[in-house]
Image (tube, helix red, strand yellow):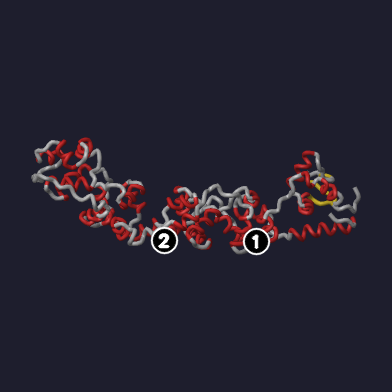
Amino acid sequence: MSDNQEFYLINAFADAVGIAAQNLRRLDRRGVFKPHHVDEKGRRYYSREQIAEVEKIRDKINPRKITPPVELRERLGYGRKDISKVVGCGIENYERGITNPSLEFIEDLTKIYEVPFAEVQTAFDAVRKPSTRKTDFENAKAEVMPNRWDKETMTEPMRIRNEAGFTRPFVCDLLDLTEHTLFGYEKGDIPVTLEVIEALTKIYDVSFIVLQKAFDSLRDSQEGKKNFNNIIAVQSQGVSTPAELRFQSKLTANQISEALEITLAALTRYENGSWPVPLKVAEDMAALYNISINEIRKIFAPLSKMPELEDVKYLDRVSIWEKSITQPMALRQRIGFSRQQVYKFIGVGHAALTRYEKGESEIPLDVAEDLAKLYNVTIDEIRKVFASVRRPRQRKPNFDLLTNIRRKDFKKLTEEFRQKYKQTTNNDF
């Protein structure tokens, strides 16, 4: 070994020849391409003469792949390990396109690189693997999607709830109902029950008659009210159960079920409290017995299985509304989309979208881009609304480490290495 011969550690040699250091180690273990020598600490050293040797086998190995994210990082002088320490996770799979980055990850890189968001976004778009979600933006634009908060599309029960200052999810939590069920009540797709009306009067702090008329307006106008040939006037005072009310009418259960156009089994379940009484059936009972709907309410009230709502009137309705509606939800509702429509047009599941809108999960970059396209807004507006719900993450970036990172000029280092080799051997590689 000559004293004036220069040797290079594996990382410098890898940068010069354009082959990843891990591939050089792999070639060494396989015996395909050995370093010039290895010191007592196990560090591999390569000579300038070996550059010509590795050129001969370059096509037979997996060369170092320079993707746009890698090119952007190295152009700014950052090493992969340094950036991984700052962002709190490995970045190799993101830079190679194996894993799709999240919107928050790209925003972290914009802070580190100090470049516009669009530049980092474009770099990762070039390596991002195709999404398996099915998007359908053409039909989304063609389909008429009215804003659900417009007066033309808002039903009367929805208007009363909004004026009271409650969101649908919060009311569902109070009544132990699913959002689908309450939405069906408010749209008239599901017959509302008497006990639900009773509970809503306490929540919204309105009279029963107001809610009764609101839900009655959702019924088919052609349905109308039943005409009972012989209206039975009963004395409801002292009556405590629906069965006693029926006994006073001196009619059999079969006769009453036929008059109300319900089955005998349904009437039995209404009377024993197994089934909640639909509002329409309660109104028909009031007309049949020739008593007020309030008296029907008093008789069926002890059978209700709704949760106690005595403290609801003391709730701060405005603060509840503000806390339960996040900015991503407000943006979607302002455009006029439901979660079901978002799933239909860009393939994001209902549960996943809920987690994104509440800040419980990081939203992927490709989903954020599709939402911007679907909502016809900029990606910057999507970033703004989702940043408002961002919660502490398991991945904790540490931007303070940036002050200790020595930025490198990778192109300059490679060029200097090449120039030294050219001057020494009068040959280029």
- Pinpoint residue 297: horizontal percent, then vertical percent: 18, 48
Quarter of image, res 238:
top left
Q: Is residue 426 left or right of residue 94?
A: right
Q: Considering depth in this image, is 61 or 362 the residue closer to the camera?
A: 61
Q: Residue at x 82, y 47 (%)?
A: 54
Residue 316 shows in the view: no
Q: Which mark is residue 334?
A: 2
Q: Residue at x 30, y 47 (%)?
A: 190
- Pinpoint residue 148: horizontal percent, then vertical percent: 37, 58
Q: What residue would you read off at disc 1?
A: 403
Q: Is residue 278 left or right of residue 95?
A: left
Instruction: Identify the element where label 2 is drawn.
Output: helix
Q: Is residue 26 above or below residue 428?
A: above
Mark 1 or 2, closer to the camera:
2
Q: Is residue 370 above or below residue 233?
A: below
Mark 1 or mark 2: whose residue is earlier in sequence: 2
Instruction: Identify the element where label 1 is drawn.
Output: helix
